[in-house]
Image: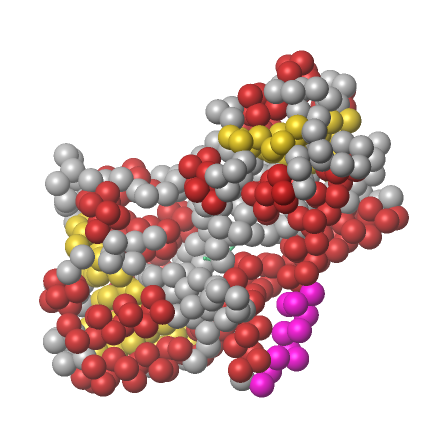
Amino acid sequence: MALKITVIGTGYLGATHAAAMAELGFEVLGLDVVPEKIEMLSRGKVPMYEPGLEELLRKHVAGIEGSTGRLRFTTSWEEVGEFGDVHFVCVNTPQKHGEYACDMSFVESAFAALAPQLRRPALVVGKSTVPVGSAARLAELLADLAPAGRDVELAWNPEFLREGFAVQDTLQPDRIVVGIGGERGEKLLREVYAIPIAEGSPFVVADYPTAELVKTAANSFLATKISFINAMAEVCEAADGDVAKLAEAIGHDERIGKKFLRAGIGFGGGCLPKDIRAFMARAGELGADQALTFLREVDSINMRRRAHMVELARETVGGSFLGQRVAVLGASFKPDSDDVRDSPALNVAGQIHLQGGQVTVYDPKGMENARRVFPTLTYAPSAPEACRGAHVVLHLTEWGEFRELDPAALAEVVAEPRILDGRNALDAAVWRAAGWTYRAMGRPRV
Ligand code: UGA
């Protein structure tokens, strides 16, 4: 009989995973402790912007016309315990307030609520990003608290999906990594992922600590790559070089690769920043802090980029933001996402606002979330509206929509045609030809 799957926590990761499991043919039950989320998802609505996710959900949510009916949602732990052969735990692990370490409280409470409901053999699969050592501890907790005892096994299966590509990354993962505690874990996960494995996704089997470390190591590597190119941008600025050209040239070396070498205002979001900090904190606990001191530098290079963008903007408007209108294009931490968690764009907008600038923000999808975080900024309904009367325009999140803007038309509505490209994503020649003063990070002025 086909495996029955539950997904605990229905944020980015969980909602996407639940829909993907239904797409792979399984009966799926999703659980969240927030009843409003469950209510929305049960109507086939996704509480965030993620391309393709709502369509996939509607294809499977029970009760929606024409759906397969394979996907349902609940707030009942008892129902989850009864239903599932495999339980995926997808709750988030944000950064702790005032500390580098990650907050494990959602993971702890999910396991504490799930375990007493496990009355029959089951596999619990952790997908959350956790400090190394967590899986071994949680396996003991399951053994102690689950009525089915040793018939309940734990596996750790980190997730590598990118926001904006969540559906694709979940259905066609570039690798599947599983940390296992016993044979049943591997067998069942091979069954769960049979389709992507058959389609060529590598299946890497490891022990718990290695699987946990793969996730933090991967995000640390990506963060390091971005900060590396941003450090090169700093040097290029000092030496009058062009970091975009430099990135293109070193990227031709296959060992280096072209990806994640876009210099600009740096990385943000709910993953990279908090993951490198949690990794440093955990290494410290393990007595291996020296191994990761370089991540402190990666973090500070990254944070310096935001401050540098604020400085560039201040310099561009003549040394002070007082009485100056600043248009900010982009609020989400990256394009094709409405996520503003630790968003470099919003952080820059906020800093300029605090320094007395009159900031107007526009983002194609992130406005509602941005307003919640920064209610004191002004928000405009379109890019041209945000730019109206601006003394400088800041391009801070590289949405496709901004590359489509007509620089000549936009020049008509601003007070001064000056643009700072914080993502190195606009065509400098086109903007300059339309009369704009275009400046980007790590690139020559003219
Ligand atoms: C990241 C990882 O890429 C995923 O593999 C991982 O699963 C996920 O975290 C997670 O831990 O859940 P995500 O946070 O969606 O995914 O975003 P990325 O695409 O990694 O971008 C992160 C930030 O880096 C963005 O702010 C982006 O603008 C910035 N970035 C990216 C650059 O500044 N330059 C680049 O060249 C690439």
Query: Vertical placement of 445 versus 415: above or below?
Result: below
- Please indicate, yes or no, whether residue 264 appears anywhere in the rendered image: yes
Question: At which x and y percent is residue 340?
Answer: 49, 46
Task: Specify the quadrant of the image occupied by residue 316.
Answer: top right
For image coordinates 17% across by 55% down, the residue present is 74
For image coordinates 42% across by 51% down, the residue present is 169
Q: How many marks?
A: 0
In this image, 24 relative to 233: left or right?
left
- Please indicate, yes or no, whether residue 187 appears anywhere in the rendered image: no
Task: Specify the quadrant of the image occupied by residue 301.
Answer: bottom right
Query: Vertical placement of 20 versus 144: above or below?
Result: above
The way the protein has been coloured in the rendering is: secondary structure
Q: Quadrant of the C terminus?
A: top right
Name the chief secondary structure element in magenta: helix
Query: Vertical placement of 85 versus 66: above or below?
Result: below
In this image, 346 relative to 35: left or right?
right
Q: Quadrant of the N terminus?
A: bottom left
Question: At which x and y percent is residue 271?
Answer: 49, 58
Q: Is residue 444 magenta-colored?
A: no
Residue range corresponding to the magenta coloring: 287-297
Question: At which x and y percent is residue 285?
Answer: 53, 82
For image coordinates 57% across by 30% down, the residue present is 360
Query: Vertical placement of 182 versus 32: above or below?
Result: below
In this image, 273 relative to 357: left or right?
left
Relative depth, front residue between 385 and 353: 353
Relative depth, front residue between 280 and 198: 280
Question: At which x and y percent is residue 312?
Answer: 75, 40
For image coordinates 54% across by 84% down, the residue present is 286
